[in-house]
Amino acid sequence: PSVVERPVVPAAAPSPSPKPRADLLRAASGGDGDSWKDTSGREYRLGMVNAPEVDECWGREATDARRSLVAGGFRADVYTRDRYGRGVSVVPAADGTNVNVALARRGHVDDRYLDEFRHENRSLAVDLDAAFAAAKRERAGLWGVCTGG
């Protein structure tokens, strides 16, 4: 039988780990599903959504989901401050995902503050209306598990 020689192709060098983008904020440890600090100590609050506290129904899941979404870094489009001085924000994750809307759509937050604060950011409110409607319809996350949700 004949032997076919194939050229040896060197293995590709392992690609370096992606460097953190300097233009992104990093979340410090701590926080919950709708509020946290960045590594320089600035506090953020997701606009128009309410996550259960960590010890409430779906609180741990909401916190874990928020942490996962911002793990690669985030931006904070602060549009006002709350009574605690936190920057109330629309938060795009590193991949562009709108964290406020993603948490609403997946049922990790409720709409307790939507009507009260919709005047502060009408375009976010419109996006959240659709996300909450779908999550409720599908009984996603807290809408299917927690009483009163």
Image (cartoon, rainbow, N blue to C red):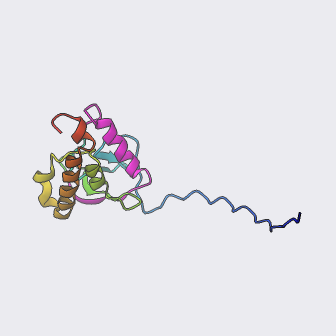
Residue 96 falls left or right of residue 12? left
Quarter occupied by the C terminus: top left
Which residue of the protein is positioned furthest toward the front in this rendering? Answer: 1
* Residue 85 position in % (x across, y down): 23, 49
Which residue of the protein is positioned furthest toward the top in this rendering? Answer: 55
The answer to which image quadrant residue 142 occupies is top left
* Residue 130 position in % (x across, y down): 20, 57
114 within the magenta span: no
55 within the magenta span: yes
The answer to which image quadrant residue 117 occupies is bottom left
Vertical arrangement, residue 31 with respect to residue 2, above or below: above
Quarter occupied by the N terminus: bottom right
Q: Residue at x 40, y 42 (%)?
A: 29
* Magenta span of residues: 53-81
* Residue 63 position in % (x across, y down): 33, 41
* Residue 97 position in % (x across, y down): 35, 59
Front residue of 130 and 21: 130
Residue 2 seen in the current view? yes
Residue 123 falls left or right of residue 72? left
Q: Residue at x 35, y 45 (%)?
A: 65
Q: How many marks do you count on the picture?
A: 0
Q: Residue at x 15, y 36 (%)?
A: 148
Which residue of the protein is positioned furthest toward the right in this rendering? Answer: 1
Residue 92 falls left or right of residue 131? right
Residue 40 seen in the current view? no
